[in-house]
Image: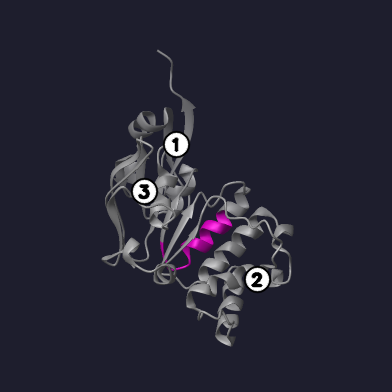
């Protein structure tokens, strides 16, 4: 499913947070959104998963205006993992994943045999079937992320939106989570903090600074030394990854003048 963001702006309490954003993610693409803290990445993604209504512009899924869809229909097409998505109640892993089936259930909310099968398959797919009876709050950060991805997969969406999905994870967990997302077959739009992870896993990158898109394209074309100096205020040295060939970055402070 294709995602088109067209001329999207958000203004809150007189402050313009993002301005005239245009972005496209083709079906099955993994598109990364990168930029400094406070640049507008989370604000933009909140509009995409309908936690925030834009002041102007639109988000379209295969041409359909997202905010015109019912909540149930929107949830059947798009799933999201916000930055803060931990449960305060100690549901079991199985119960957490089952929440992904709510958009597909009747008003009575009855869990069917088909729902149970979908949830079991989602847990198996992320390698977390053995955690089904565990309390969610007892899990490690990496285990929690796998379970939340399983919940999103159980939702059976076409689009997955992730806001900093690798925060607070060690490097092995970061690689595991992004490999799971990359292999999902979904259209993925993710805000990523680590530029090297973004370069390795994303098909395309959009760079946002001060609420505007300042560059977009394949990682190799976007992550230039000039752009990284202008946007992030660092000096970058690019080297190819020895296996994938993806650009990898080594950073220094910019020399003082």
Give above or below for 217 relative to 103.
above
Of the 4 image quadrants, the one containing the N terminus is bottom left
Which region of the structure is painted magenta?
Answer: 175-187
Residue annotated with mark 1: 38
Closer to the camera in the image, 227 or 143 = 143
Tell me which label, 1 or 3, sits earlier in the chain.
1
Q: Nearer the viewer, residue 149 or 16?
A: 16
Q: Position of residue 112 (x, y in %)?
A: 58, 85
Q: Tell me: residue 34, above or below residue 73.
A: above
Which of the two marks, 2 or 3, is nearer to us in this view? 2
Badge 2: few (under 14), some or many (20 or more) residues near its Cα, within 10 Å? some
Instruction: Give the residue pinned by disc 2.
Output: 95
Q: Residue at x 48, y 78 (%)?
A: 104
Residue closest to the eye, 48 or 105? 105
Quote the CA–CA distance across marks 2 and 3: 35 Å
Would you say residue 32 sits in the magenta stretch? no
Q: Does any portion of residue 239 appear in the rendered image?
A: yes
Would you say the residues marked 1 and 3 are in contact, meaning their CB atoms lie under 8 Å apart? no
- The dot on residue 116 is none
Distance CA(mark 1)–CA(mark 3): 18 Å
Q: Residue at x 57, y 47 (%)?
A: 167
Quadrant for the C terminus in the image: top left
Above/below status of 61 relative to 37: below
Q: Which residue was labeled with disc 3?
A: 205
Q: Residues within 10 Å of mark 3 (few under 14, many from 20)?
A: many
Total numbered circles? 3
Does residue 53 appear to the left or right of 63 in the view shown? right
Q: Earlier in the sequence, mark 2 or mark 1?
A: 1
């Amino acid at each position: 499913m294709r995602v088109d963001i067209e001329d999207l702006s958000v203004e809150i309490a007189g402050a313009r947070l993002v301005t005239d954003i245009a972005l496209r993610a083709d079906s099955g693409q993994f598109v990364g959104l990168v930029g400094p803290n406070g640049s507008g990445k989370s604000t933009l993604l909140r509009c995409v998963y309908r936690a925030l209504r834009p002041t102007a512009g639109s988000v379209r899924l295969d041409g359909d205006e997202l905010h015109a869809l019912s909540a149930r229909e929107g949830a059947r097409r798009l799933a999201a993992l916000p930055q803060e998505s931990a449960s305060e109640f100690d549901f079991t892993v199985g119960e957490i994943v089952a929440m992904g089936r709510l958009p597909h259930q009747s008003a009575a909310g009855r869990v069917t045999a088909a729902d149970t099968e979908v949830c079991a398959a989602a847990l198996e797919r992320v390698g977390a079937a053995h955690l089904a009876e565990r309390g969610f709050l007892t899990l490690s950060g990496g285990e929690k992320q796998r379970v939340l991805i399983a919940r999103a997969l159980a939702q059976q969406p076409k689009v997955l939106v992730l806001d900093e999905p690798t925060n607070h994870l060690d490097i092995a967990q970061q690689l595991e989570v992004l490999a799971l997302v990359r292999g999902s077959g979904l259209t993925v739009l993710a805000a990523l903090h680590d530029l090297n992870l973004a370069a390795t896993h994303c098909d395309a990158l959009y760079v946002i600074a001060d609420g505007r898109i300042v560059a977009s394209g394949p990682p190799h074309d976007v992550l230039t030394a000039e752009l990284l100096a202008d946007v992030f205020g660092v000096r970058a040295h690019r080297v190819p990854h020895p296996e994938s060939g993806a650009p990898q970055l080594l950073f220094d402070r910019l020399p003082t003048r």
